[in-house]
Image (cartoon, grey):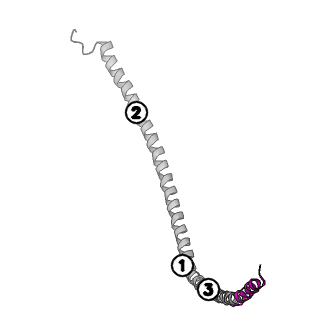
Amino acid sequence: MNWPIRKARSELRRQAVRVVQPSFDELQARLEAVTEAQRDSLGRELTQLRAEVAAILPGVRAENVELTRMLRQQGDASDEVAEILGRTLTRLGAEVEALSEAVERLEARLDDERQTPAASGVGDPAE
């Protein structure tokens, strides 16, 4: 390669570095400024969000306690209803059993009464 061409290329490189380097430094400074502004903005938003959550949290806790109390009461009421229903079913079962035994006794008595007139001949038209 020719010496004047080398010199020209070298000069172009130096000029390019002088032009690009300040632009890069400026862009980096702008990026850092924007990043810092975003950090500040995000910090303010997070602080505001924490304050809103802190304001809402006691109400949410109170509602949670109330809902838990209501669910426990409902569970207790369901247990009580189940207990009453169980006692009622047990009593009804015993009454049905007693009724079944009474029906069996009545059927046996009716059978006895049907067999008694036939055996003694009472009510027999042939007499």
Amino acid carrying label 2: it is Ala
The residue identified by callout 1 is: 59
The residue identified by callout 2 is: 102
Q: Residues within 10 Å of mark 1 (few under 14, many from 20)?
A: few
SS under mark 2: helix
Amino acid carrying label 3: it is Gln
Q: Earlier in the sequence, mark 3 or mark 2?
A: 3
Residue found at x 76% / y 83%: 6
Residue extending farthest front: 2
Q: Nearer the viewer, residue 83 or 107?
A: 83
Q: Which mark is residue 28?
A: none
Residue found at x 51% / y 67%: 70
SS under mark 1: helix
Q: Is residue 40 magenta?
A: no
- Type of secondary structure dominating the magenta stretch: helix
Q: Which quadrant would residue 39 be assigned to in this image?
A: bottom right
Residue found at x 27% / y 15%: 122
The residue identified by callout 3 is: 38
Q: Which residues are magenta?
A: 1-18
Percent coordinates x, y for residue 110 in the rendering: 34, 24
Q: Earlier in the sequence, mark 1 or mark 2?
A: 1
Percent coordinates x, y for residue 99 in the rendering: 40, 36
Q: Nearer the viewer, residue 104 or 112?
A: 104
Q: Is residue 9 magenta?
A: yes
